[in-house]
Amino acid sequence: MPISPYVLLPRVPLGRNTPLGQDGPVPEGGGDTPPPVTGGSGLLAVPFGADLAPEVALPVPAAALLAHYEAKGEAGEIVEVPVADGETVGRVLLYGIGDGGAAALRRAGAAVARRGKGRDAIRIVLPEGPVAALVEGALLATYTFRIGEARSTPAVRVEFVGEGVAAEVARGETVASAVAFARDLANTPSSVKTPAWLADRAVEHVLDGGNGRTRARVRGEDELRAGGFGGILAVGRGSVSPPRLIELSYTPEGATRHVVLVGKGITYDTGGLSLKPTENMKFMKTDMAGGAAVIAVIGALARLNVPVRVTGLIAAAENAFSGTAQRPSDVITQYGGRTVEVLNTDAEGRLVMADALAYADAELDPDVVVDIATLTGAIGIALGKGLGAVFASDDALAAELSRAGESSGDRLWRMPLVEDYVPALESGVADLANIESGSTYGAGSITAALFLREFTGGRPWAHLDIAGVGRSTADEGVVSKGATGYGVRLLLEWLSDGTGHPV
Ligand code: BES
Ligand code: MN
Ligand code: ZN
């Protein structure tokens, strides 16, 4: 008996995804016939308990089947069932959705999509209700990156079917597409990814699909010099590829609040003259993951109709090892005039971030500032790969971000800004030192956060240290090996929950 390329279709087909990293039209409403799955093999996935008759002829009733396999309906649980499809044999995946919450739906979507790997397409029948998380999970799990392709192509084409879920499918697709874009940027090798290249991609990305509501401005070396951005220039001076400050803005009509997002955009971090050992250095092409998240978020705001004005600042530089590089013991002048003694050139992230934070405070008048950076290896040791860190000057802001972390799947843990550690950043020759002297406390992530706080002008501010969660070593759930795109889902959730984020 030949294997059916496809199992009979449910009656109310709806949407299909475009390849990740691309945006395409999302079908409005139900009723379209989805395009046939051409060639090769297709797969149909249906939630436990959904009424399969008469589309699919199960060998025994679904309830009996599930009992036979002792299926509990947990999220991520899948029962594969061979079904008769005319003259052929097809296969249906019955999948569990656990408690039906966002985390469970995301896990279910990812598990189903991973079963489709190696096939041409998988058609997922959605359960009822808010299912954006399932769509998002399925699409994120199909992410693959291959150098040479302009944009990543999904491991399997995913189609979604369901009644009254158009808006949910569209949201899931937009969010997953934004995460994929951030992953693409961070996975791109640094031989390609110069600060100028990153700026070009950022401008292109946010203007495309911004609906006239997004703008971009890129400062090159001359402008950085004229503006006094001494931190970005000092870090970038060792590289043949000069630094950039990328400023992206999204201004919806009637916005009353202004959020500034600042992203670390180190396109490669050798450590500078404080050179990293190879074992640590080889991961450093993703040291712009925070900046990538900011670019991807700004690019998605217009599509999601977010009601908040948002400015993104990406401080982009390559921290290279060369004869023109800054030296340990150099003193630099940050944006705004504060001097910093550079005791370790590998603590470069805070130098570029400080300029952007000080600029945001002096020129952009934000209500809230959130920065996101692969800032310290120490945070990966403290929290591992499952949780990002949030440091915040404001309890309400920390709580909002933590909540958005839980519901978006980009989980956060709050870390303390320990006042007793502030004197460790004192310098004998400048206003501040860029690392604690004498390793007084050894809490590298905390002192890094305290350094950044010096440049926030006392505004409501949160710092996300994503050095642990920015990269993954394995394909697992919604995450693929390499860059994770951490922070995109978190920030989009936080910005679009409609509260306006009073702090
Ligand atoms: N980019 C690194 C932090 C990092 C480490 C990111 C591991 C991802 C994985 C950062 O610029 C850095 O080098 N930090 C130093 C700070 C130290 C010199 C105070 C570190 O963590 O060792
Ligand atoms: Mn470094
Ligand atoms: Zn770095």
Image (cartoon, helix red, strand yellow):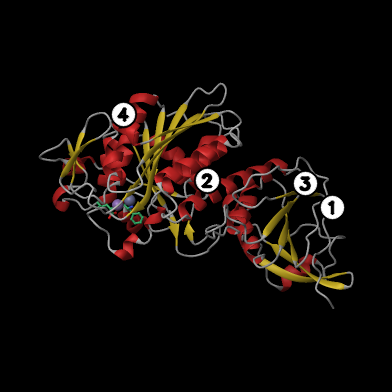
Q: CA distance from mark 1 to mark 3?
A: 10 Å
Nearer the viewer's eye, disc 1 or disc 4? 4
Looking at the image, residue 237 sits to the left or right of residue 13; the answer is left
Q: CA distance from mark 1 to mark 4?
A: 61 Å
**Looking at the image, which is closer to me, 7 or 2?**
2
Mark 3 crowd level (few <14, some 14–19, many ≥20, 10 Å Cα): some
Mark nearer the N terminus (1 vs 2):
1
Mark nearer the N terminus (4 vs 2):
4
| Residue 5 seen from this side | yes
Image mark for residue 489: 2
Residue positioned most to the bottom:
1
Q: Mark 4 = which residue?
A: 227
Marks 1 & 3, CB-CB < 8 Å contact: no
Residue 305 at x, y percent in the picture: 60, 32
Query: From the viewer's perspective, is residue 354 above or below residue 22?
Result: above
Q: CA distance from mark 2 to mark 3?
A: 25 Å
Mark nearer the N terminus (2 vs 3):
3
Q: Residue sitting at 73 percent across and 68 percent down?
A: 66
Q: Mark 3 = which residue?
A: 163
Query: From the viewer's perspective, is residue 3 above or below residue 255?
Result: below
- The amino acid type found where label 3 is placed reads Glu
Nearer the viewer's eye, disc 4 or disc 2? 4
Image-quadrant location for residue 264: top left
Q: Mark 1 = which residue?
A: 11
